[in-house]
Image: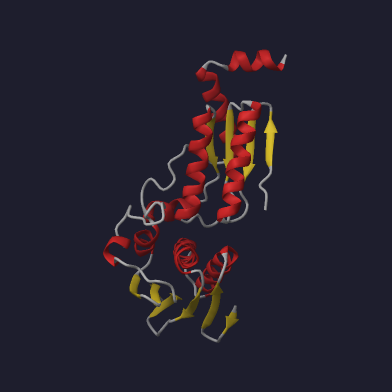
Amino acid sequence: MRIPILRLDRILLVSIQIDLSDNDAMEFQSDLVERVAEIEATGVAIDITALDVVDSYMARVINDTASMVRLLGAEVVICGVQPFVALTLIEMGRDLLGADCAFNLGQGLEILKQRIAERGDIRFTEDEND
Amino acid sequence: MTSTPFGQRVEIGDAADIVTARRAARELCERLGFGKADQTRLATAVSELARNVIQYAGTGHCLIEDGSDALNRRIQVVVEDQGPGIANLEQALTYGYSTSGGLGAGLPGTRRLVDDFQIESAPGLTRISIALNKPF
């Protein structure tokens, strides 16, 4: 099962809709880092609105993916953590999901754009799009 | 998956069964009148335990049952495997300890999510019983 990666200028959007097996997770992570490097993405939004259970394994997959993307130089936001997922994750242990979060994809994109602007390489982005 | 009047038995053999097991747990939880927070807690706990079965034993099964009495709603889940067992229970229940490169949150995290948590483990049989209770 491949997770589609959508492109919006130099921002990538991924929506995790299903529980990822170990293999799916590896494939998803390598697909995403490859794509981030290929287009030199400035930001990545990972949407998990559809996940009604995030166990410690899925939390690790999401965190690791976010860290990998950050290592390459892109900003990351996790979008749409469900309220009862948040409650359960914190009850299980702090720090299970450590990345920056947003209510939904729209807010996530705003945060990404703001961060990218703060970094100051927005001009570079605009030049390239000319 | 087999159903009895009191619950369901889910065989655990691959990653897809993790989803089947936790869905079955969530459904019975909802049917018994537990709220969404409890449904999510139990589904997550079952997910952790079923994942451990796959990771450490390969195969096993999970029994999800209605244990309600006159005073309390109760949902109980027993997850069993015939794997090598847990060498050091105390360590396995310590937050942050992992033999698999994981977060070490699985068992201790599960224990925090449920009202009752019992574990017995020896080579050839690991049985973890969890339950949620809610007064009527």
In the image, what residue occupies the spot 68% across and 30% down? A8
Question: Which residue occupies the extreme left position in the image?
Answer: B90
Q: Who is closer to the viewer here, B52 or A119? A: B52
Q: Who is closer to the viewer here, A55 or B56? A: B56
Q: Who is closer to the viewer here, A119 or A84? A: A119
In the image, what residue occupies the spot 61% across and 38% down? A32
Could you tell me if residue A129 is visible in this image? yes
Q: How many marks?
A: 0
In the image, what residue occupies the spot 53% across and 70% down? B30
Snapshot quadrant of residue B125:
bottom left
B103 to the left or right of A54: left
Q: Who is closer to the viewer here, B100 or B130? A: B100
**Residue B130 to residue A19: above or below:** below
Tell me the quarter of the image containing the C terminus of chain A. Answer: top right
Q: Whole-percent x and y of residue A117?
A: 55, 19
Could you tell me if residue A50 is visible in this image? no
Question: Which residue occupies the extreme right position in the image?
Answer: A130
Q: Whole-percent x and y of residue B12?
A: 54, 72
